[in-house]
Image (tube, grey):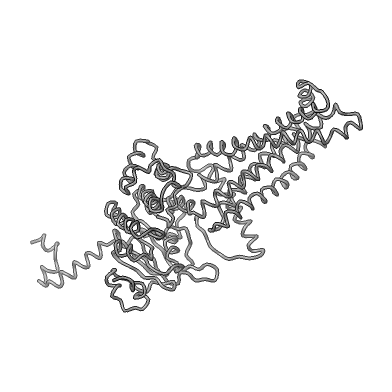
Amino acid sequence: MAAVQEQELTGWKKWLAGIGDQCVFFTRFFRNIFTGGFEWSEFVRQCYEIGYRSMMLVGITSFIMGAVLILQLRPSFVKFGEESMLPTSLTVSLIREIGPVITALICAGKIASSIGAELGSMKVTEQIDAMEVSGANPLQYLVVTRILAVTLMVPLLTVIGDVIGLLGGFLAINFTDSISFYLYFHKCIASIDFSDFLPAFVKTIFFGFAIGFVGCYKGFNSNKGTASVGIAANSAVVTASLWIFVIDAFCVQITSLLFYR
Amino acid sequence: MTRSVFKSPAYYFTGNMEAVAAQKKQTTKAKAEVVISIKGLKKSFGKKDVLKDINLEVNRGENVVVMGRSGEGKSVTIECIVGMLIPDAGSVKVFNEEVADLNDKKLKELRMKIGFLFQSGALFDSMTVRENLEFPLTRVLKIKDQHELDERVKEVLEGVGLLDAIDKLPSDLSGGMRKRIGLARTLIIKPEIMLYDEPTTGLDPITSREISELILDMQKKYKTTSLIITHDMECARITADRVVIMNDGAYIAEGSFDSLHKSKNEIVKEFFKDIS
């Protein structure tokens, strides 16, 4: 039964109850994907809000990150006379690790906090309760659409961020050296293969899911008070960022076992 | 003769007018269908016992006002009625169905028969008034025909006198207007029961009176059963068929507004002391 059972728990009981709550929320999310009508228009709107509106931030950050990496790597490479390896090093580090993680952290800061705050304020102003008592399904409308939109958008943003990061690297190399656009991208593409791209892409799907899930869970389950909106937004960012590192560590282990033995 | 026997057997067999009156009363009682029945309802939050022993029956078509001091658990009672909270003990039956025992599907069906007007109006602030009103129609009643949607939206907006606000956002509306739109949104699915959570709180006396009169008008128009939680005496006076006074987690007095006005109970007298 969809109802709220109010209880005051403390210590480990509260922690365990929190884990249980998250499991229930997780189950309800999956059940609601397949039952009832899917909110396509809201899903598309969320994709636009989450994806398109984050593109500029991800683009700028990735561009700077690509350029900075080249500037930081160059002195060491010069020592060994390996400047020609700069595009290769940048591509591998950007595609495999830095691109996905940086994009996911930016999305955690922007998207998880905005979802947490939006749903939190909807909870405080009784909008979620109003949906529920009218017989509508707030999970289907608010949660399923947002989580799926973030899960879809974060990998796409990562791909866009990777490409822009490589452009940043190209610009940084041309500050001091000279390399043609064609040669630079030829070196970049030649340095990676499917085993570099696929695991990195797959982990961004998990990053996206974690960001959406944490943002929605924190917002949907915030307490009724204005302070709880801030708490929901803040803890959504912190928890999502933490999950990104945990998922990353886990995925790297699996990738190492599968591809790099 | 046969007809008169069936129509009024008590009078036919006894010739006694008192018996007829008693039978009439009994018939009226039998006709009054109980739509909400609360028995021995208890609810605690942590160590605080909010509802200690709530007993209430609301008949079809009746306007019942529940009054009590802030924090007495008036809102908790109606949250138990719609299944937002699970009672610790006791029974809450709506249309003879135990709310706490309903599965998700049944609960959804029940909620489609109940309208809930929140204290704040609870309008979806990212949607226009039209989208707010269409939301329950498209999501709950699954109406897809745009012509029908427009008709129903216009009908309720005319009812609350805010047709001009159809394309406005909730942030562009005043407190009273939000309450009216909130009322329109709950009425648009034509519920059989209306639950009002402090409908006039935070409004000036004139707007409060307008909202109270609107509640009464809408009740007559849509023939709903209403349970109104308030501590606004004017709202209670205008809307109530029956008033229930709540104190310390239980109902302590019940009756018409006028009868409670004359009550000797000290707590009840406190409520009515500013009423001339």
Vertical placement of residue B155 versus B271, above or below: above
Vertical placement of residue B90 versus A201, above or below: below
Residue at 29%, 58% (x, y): give it: B61
Vertical placement of residue B138 versus A180, above or below: below
Residue B158 place in picture, x, y as percent: 31, 45
Vertical placement of residue A76 versus A221, above or below: above
Residue B233 place in picture, x, y as percent: 34, 66
Could you tell whether B266 is left or right of A191 in the image?
A: left
Quadrant housing the N terminus of chain B: bottom left
Q: Report the residue that reaches farthest toward the right.
A: A80
Residue B186 place in picture, x, y as percent: 38, 50
Residue at 67%, 34% (x, y): give it: A59
Quadrant housing the C terminus of chain B: bottom left
Could you tell whether B124 is left or right of A59 in the image?
A: left
Q: Report the residue that reaches farthest toward the left.
A: B1
On the image, which quarter does residue B223 sit in? bottom left
Q: Toward the viewer: A252 or A125? A: A125
Q: How many marks?
A: 0
Residue at 50%, 48% (x, y): give it: A138
Q: Toward the viewer: B89 or A135? A: A135
Residue A137 place in picture, x, y as percent: 48, 48
Could you tell whether A168 is left or right of B16 in the image?
A: right
